[in-house]
Image (cartoon, rainbow, N blue to C red):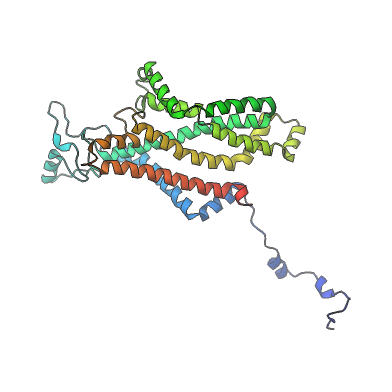
Amino acid sequence: MKKFPLSLHLDTDAFLPASDKEKEYMVQMRPSTTFFKDGVRRLLKNKVATVSFFIIVFITLSCIILPVVWPYEYDDQLGISLGKPVDPSYANLAPFEYGATEQAKIDAGEKVFPHIFGTDSAGRDYFIRVVYGTRISLAVGFFASLIVLVIGMTVGSISGYCGGKVDIVIMRIVDVIYSLPDMLMVILLAAALKQSGLNEAIKGTVLEDIGSNIISLFIVFGLLYWVSMSRLIRGQILSLREQEYVLAARTSGAKGSRIIKKHLMPNCIGVVIVSTALQIPSAIFTESYLSFLGLGVNAPMPSLGSLASDALNGISSYSYRLIIPAIVISLIVLSLNLFGDGLRDAFDPKLNS
């Protein structure tokens, strides 16, 4: 019978068990996932961040592979041989030009690898110098960010978890460090390390090529640049330590170090990843303009900043030697910043709630 619309009787058909097809239609189960997988899925939807990531990977792999297969070294002065005078035809070659002896070999039918970016005033292949300069800048950026990450996470987590007098003392130290001018500290440390004979002490080691200036830069990053990371981690720990799972861990007898490592830090990992990704371009830019001022790697080891500085001497005649490292620096810093923004959008739970 058809039920009257204004009737107060219940419609028994509405209480019939649902069929399997109706259950499949109504119940749409989302596949199980993790915080990391969910963040990666959102990151891949961001096309700008994805393209920036592949650019960074391409540049990094190029800096690792190309020096192995390239026929020229960054410090090889072409046209110089033992017992013979210097051949001036190799200095300041334009892109895809050849020196006198190389041109003679080509005329004789031999194959000579081209100088894609030409040579500098000392007759060194400029392309491989740009590759080595990019390698140095990326290495400084990644290692400096790693130093900042380790120190900042350690100090920030201790300050946030302990609170009270420990937090007050640490934060006052952070305030003092914030007041120190970082560039002045780099200059003073570089001068002090030179006077201390560090260059003589590192001779014959892997640190000889980069010199005391870069070591002083790492020291300054370890002394000064961790404060922002520590404040960020401290704020996250202060909000997380009041959660129920932390109280449960305390009541079960877990030590503070275990609570920080197993419960608090994993819940801060999204913020840590984003902050580290944004710290890398800052470190690269700092190294580049310090090298531009002459406080970077020791010659003949190149850096993107030192290459740009050296190009100023012939900027009117060889302006491309300034443009090329400037473009590489801009591309690296821009890609890392865009990738860092994409990480923040993908892994920050506040932006995805």
Does residue 294 sit above or below 56 in this rendering?
above
Q: Is residue 241 left or right of residue 76?
A: right
Residue 112: which quarter of the image?
top left
Residue 3 pos. (x, y %)? 84, 81
Front one among 344 and 189: 189
Residue 78 pos. (x, y %)? 19, 34
Can residue 253 be seen here? The reply is yes
Residue 238 pos. (x, y %)? 67, 36
Q: Which residue is most to the bottom? A: 1
Q: What's the residue at 65%, 36% (across, down)?
A: 237
Can residue 206 be seen here? The reply is no
Q: Which residue is most to the right? A: 9
Q: Is residue 17 left or right of residue 338?
A: right
Q: Is residue 243 left or right of residue 292?
A: right
Q: Is residue 68 left or right of residue 279?
A: left
Residue 248: which quarter of the image?
top right
Q: What's the residue at 70%, 63% (across, down)?
A: 27
How many discs appear?
0
Q: Quadrant of the N terminus?
A: bottom right
Residue 205: which quarter of the image?
top left
Residue 353 pos. (x, y %)? 64, 52
Does residue 6 sit above or below 281 in this rendering?
below
